[in-house]
Image (cartoon, rainbow, N blue to C red):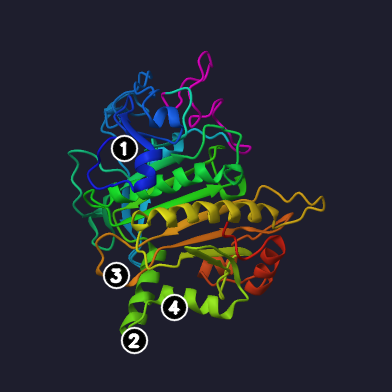
Amino acid sequence: MAEFANYVPGPYAAEHIRITPTTLADGRDFFYLDDDPEYVSGAKTRELEDPRPLAYRFANQLNAAGEEVPYAAPEMRRDPLTGDWIPMATARMNRPITAGPGATATGNPLAARKPGDPYQDNEVPDTDYNVVVFENRFPSMVRVPGRSEAVDYVDGNPLWERRLAAGRCEVICFDPDENGLPADLPVRRLRTVVEAWAFRTAEISTMEGIEQIFPFENHGQEIGVSLAHPHGQVYCYPFIAPKMESELKHTEAYFERTGGNLLKDIMNAEIEAGERVVMRNHSWVAYVPAAARWPLEVHVAPVRDVLTLDQLDDQERWDLAQMYSTLLKRGNAFFDKGDGKGMDLPYIAAWHQAPIHDARREHYRLNLQFFSFRRAANKIKYLAGSESGMAAWISDTTPELIARRFHELGPIDIDD
């Protein structure tokens, strides 16, 4: 396996996962994570050469008038009313879309290369893979070499701070089968996905200017997925995202008031209450939070105090793969359409981990927040006036009812 600046594989990954880095034709980082024994052993090797004639990713571009202009780097502006930074990336308007009625691409850029296929803009150089990670071709945030990241002001008015959105965006493809579902992947493959989350967290945490690393998965057209392929993303913010900032304020205030860790105490309180716990194994607890917002919402927490994904040990990574697999399967069975087969649940799986440099990180704790907009087999929870206009949530159910439905779908204890 290649050596990296900050990532150190544990015993399982050192023996059973091989990470091979390369560079795509336009200069973006790309990594194969192989769990196939023939590739792990080196008996077979992956294709490292990207055959596409792509221009350098930060090369000058032509505008509508045919004039050469500098690369349109994403910028971000601070909302003076909330303090939130808002990234703005006009290049994303040109990204390919394969899902939904507005699909624009005739092929899937996340699929392995298919010899003879008329669509030849695939992001993966090889004709097969296990798991791959690469920088997003149409990033919401990216550091551009040679560009100043100093703050200036929109219209010269100090009300509106502006600077480059100098973060990083990566894509993680979970499996080469473009028609597959994450819920159908074997636990062994999800274990490789967990390793990918840990690998990227470890490596990106040493990159200049990054404050928060956010691995997440969007799944389903209703969620807004633009590429129909089992995949997730890693957003690396050059700021603390608003939800994380709110959580840090509360965890820090709780520590100052009680000396305790709020996230740990919430987990322990849910375990003690019992009613809303939906799954447990050696290393993880999954529960419907007592103040759940979404019509289907589950939080997953490690039993041991852990700040970030790369701090998980081998057992915790295996147990997470098992729990994630079980959660996705039960999520798909949650809503009954009348045929007993469930549905392909639209969901967001959001990893909340301690920020990189903020001193409040020591009083935080790793957790996964999994939720769906779906509130019935044929109904979606829309964020209307109260939720969108005032961020005041109105729930259509109760956490106890959500948990009760999960209890119908399988046992709480899922240890093998």
SS label for mark 2: helix
Per the model, the C-alpha gap separating discs 4 and 3 is 15 Å
Residue behind mark 3: 362
Badge 1 vs badge 2, beta-carbon distance below 8 Å = no
Per the model, the C-alpha gap separating discs 3 and 1 is 37 Å
In the image, farthest residue toward the right: 338
Quarter of the image with the C terminus in it: bottom right
Q: Position of residue 396 (x, y in %)?
A: 67, 69
Q: Residue at x 47, y 46 (%)?
A: 191
117 magenta-colored = yes
Q: Position of residue 207 (x, y in %)?
A: 23, 48
Q: Which residues are magenta?
A: 99-125
Residue behind mark 4: 265
> Which of label 3 and label 1 is nearer to you?
3
Q: Viewer-proximal residue, 28 or 311?
A: 311
> Which of label 2 and label 4 is nearer to you?
4
376 magenta-colored = no
